[in-house]
Structures are given as structure tokens and as C-alpha cells.
Image (cartoon, rainbow, N blue to C red):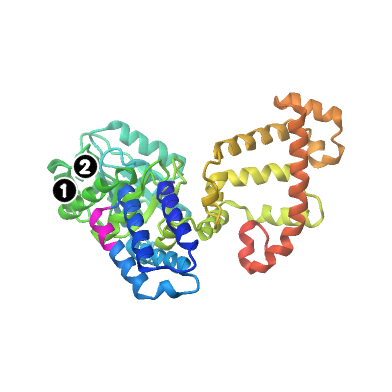
Amino acid sequence: MAFDSLTDKLQNVFRKLRGKGRLTEDDVRTAFKEIKMALLEADVNFKIVKKFTKDVTERAIGEDVMNGLNPGQMVVKIVNEELINLMGPEGEELPLKPKDQITVLMMMGLQGAGKTTTAAKLAGLLKKKGRKPLLVSCDIYRPAAMEQLQVNGEKVGVDVFMAGGSMSAAQIAKAAYSHAGKNGHDVLIIDTAGRLHIDQEMMDELKEIREQVTIDTTLLTVDAMTGQDAVKVAEAFDEQIGIDGVILTKLDGDTRGGAALSVKAVTGRPIYFTGIGEKLTDLEPFYPDRMASRILGMGDVLTLIDKAQETIDEEEAAKLVGKVGRAQFDFDDYLQSIKQMRKMGGLADILKMLPGVSGQLQGVDMDQGEKQMAVTEAMIYSMTPEERANPDILNPSRKNRIAKGSGVDISEVNRIIKQFNQTKKMMKQMPGMMKKFGRKGKFLGFPF
């Protein structure tokens, strides 16, 4: 994730503070100097960093943190609250008109920010929410952009308006709006042309589109990997066209993530969504409190729950609960659990959302864990249906055949059987344990 480096540095600062029974004013000021450097290295806008560190230092010293029972934890609490205020303070939903009207969204941004892919991601997300979106490309300079949008639109099951002839970008947008009205679409997403840099020709074209079609919301797609440059881009678009909200892309990349901490504070415009991967489902609503929690290494259980609710089939989950209760959990169910984990983003993404876990993943080769899951799948697929349903019949002869079929040593087969038995034992205990969470336990597939 974009903030891994920042998270590590902040956790080191907090670790030092927690190690002290009492804090002096010098301890607090020294800690916040380190936090200031960590934020600057994450490419957060320097004016934002200056104000942020001033505010948290004044709060920490002014709230008598030094004499508290747990001063280190109080400092973390203050930093968390100020991070939320910096990015929010609250998440905002994309404004949409009632379904009997057409909401027009115009996507803007520089070339390479992932705007066209993000348009398709957004269309797919809105479709899941019961809307009927229509995509249209107004990029008349890159035929590949139109083709890309059409391909991605088909993948997410959303209609794409394809203009014929030599029409201008504004004329295409107007024709798409007319088509949307005639065909019952309630959201029109206009993907505009990008440039390698901001130029007047681009801005004039966007203004022409606005003259032809009433735009309800302008969405600026910003590459999180560009750091402070992302803020400059946002300011330029806001000054010339006006932006209503931001979508941050590539937040999963090996980047410093400063854009997420700067763009709202500098522009005053909300971040509506973040792109967290290359799949067309990898678009998440932006919640400042959840992002602050991730940055501080405190996990993000609410997003994990949301992902699980989207991917776990309740009917299948109910069947699994019944099988667990009757001690009938088998290798087919084990295989299904691996598939569900992949749908939720994979092992690394899930672990990073668990409180207290992300800080312990330093130096852990998560790719190795993913590879091991693939090996496990290969071994299960090498079993016969009877063996998957009745693991107790796996004798040495059968294990040898499974090992050869999946290209592993028999010790690997023994290891996975042992791991399966441990999981089965744990699954028997889970329903009772999850009752403590009430209906929230349902996100793990237990319907209560």
C-alpha cells in the first residue's frame, strides 16, 4: 500500500513514546519533529505538514498528555483525530439524482492517471448499487482510449456509447446524453481526453463539453504516485474548470501517498473514491477515518467487513455453517475458502486490515504466502472427489499419487492435511466465538 513506509516510521515514533512511563515536553516536540520528517518524506504538501505538526503539538502539550496514565496512546489518539480532519473529516457520498433523471459525471485528469479504467470501475460500482450507467469516451485523439473504454464497459456489463463520424468531443457528449435519455440510463459518465501536461487546449475542450451538456459533478482523477504534483494538478483544474471531487488512483502502488493527505486540505474538495488495484472491481469509497487507521497501522476492519459482504455468498455461507456444525467441513470447503480470500483481495490485503497485524508484517514475504495457496489448490485439485469429501481415507498410496499429480514432495501433502485438520478444529469453535459479535459475525459467513 502507498503508506507502508510512512506507517513504519510513525509506528517507530509511537513505539518510543509508549516505552516511556511519562513524557516531557521535549519528548513530545522531538516525536513530532520525527513525524514532520516522515510526512515530508511521504511527499505531503509542506504547508499542510507545517500546520498539521503545529496543531498536533499544541494539542498534545495543551491536553496534559505528559501526565496521563498512557501518554503514548494519547499521542496516537491525537494524531489519528488530526489525520481524519486533514482528509475529511467525514467521507462524502457521490451525489446522484433520483433514478428518473440523468446524473452527468465528467471525468478529468492527465494522461496516465488511470482515468479511462477508473471510469469503467465507477460504472461497475454504480451498477452494483442499482443504477443504469452509460459510458462515453470523448477522447477524439486516441482511438485506443475509446476501444479501451468499450472493452472495459463490456467486462463490467455497462453500455458504452460509440460515436460515429468526425464529431467534436462536445458533440459526442451531447449525443451520448440524448442516447442516455432515450434508453433509460440514469447516469452518464463522460471520459474526457487526457494530456501529458496541463494545456489550454485541454481546458478549452472541457469548457466546450460543459457548454453542451449540464455537468452535475466533475471528478478529477489523480495519480497518488505523483505526490505534491497531484495537488498542483488539482489546483489547476479547479481554477480553470472547477472540480467537485477527486478520485485517487494507484494507491496500492509502491508510492509515498502524500497526495491523499494533501489534496483535500489544499483544494477543499472531497476524495470520493480510491483505486487500490488493477482489477475493474478495485475501487473503494474513501473514508477518512478508515484511511487514518490504515496509515497508523491500526487496521481497517470496517472495509474488511464491506469487502466480505460484497464477495461472500450468504447462501453458500449458510451451507458452510451447517457443515461446520455437523463436523462435515471437507477439502472442497477448504478450496472455497481460498477462492473467497482471493476475491477479497488476497492474503496480504486481508492481513493489513486486521488491527495490530500490519506492523508485524515487516520483512514477511507475502508473495510466498500467495504461492503456497496456489500449491495448496494444486494438491486439492489432484485429489479425487471422494478424497476431497472424505479426507480420512488419504492413505500413503493416495498421498503419493496426489504429490506426483501436483508436482510436490509427499511431505507437502502431509503438511496440508495437518493444516486442514487444524483449520477444521478451529472452524468447529468459530460459531460460538462469533456470537460475541452479534449480527456483525455474519460478515464471516455465520448467519446470526
Quadrant of the rendered structure where residue 314 is? bottom right
Using residue 321 as the reference point, say whether residue 67 is left or right of it: left
Q: Is residue 281 left or right of residue 324?
A: left
Residue at 73%, 25% (x, y): give it: 405
At 46% from the left edge and 44% from the top edge, which residue is drawn? 157
Secondary structure mostly seen in the magenta stretch: helix
- Magenta span has 47? yes
Residue at the image point whose x is 68% and y is 36% from the top:
376
The residue closer to the viewer here, 178 or 319, is: 319
User: Which residue position holds label 1?
Assistant: 208
Q: Amino acid type of disc 2? A: Ala
The residue that label 2 is drawn on is 169
Q: Residue at x 39, y 46 (%)?
A: 251
Quadrant in which residue 295 is drawn: bottom left
Residue range in magenta is: 45-52
Badge 2 marks a residue whose secondary structure is helix
Q: Position of residue 416 (x, y in %)?
A: 74, 38
Indicate the secondary structure of the residue bearing disc 1.
Answer: helix
- The picture places residue 57, in percent across and down from the top left corner, at 33, 66
Crowdedness near tag 2: few (<14), some (14–19) or many (≥20) residues, C-alpha within 10 Å: many
Q: Position of residue 213 (x, y in %)?
A: 22, 53
Amino acid residing under circle 1: Glu
Question: Quick check: marks 2 and 1 in contact, CB under 8 Å?
Answer: yes
Q: CA gap, disc 2 to disc 1? A: 8 Å
| Residue 28, numbered label | none
Q: Is residue 271 above or below residue 277?
A: below
Quarter containing the C terminus: bottom right
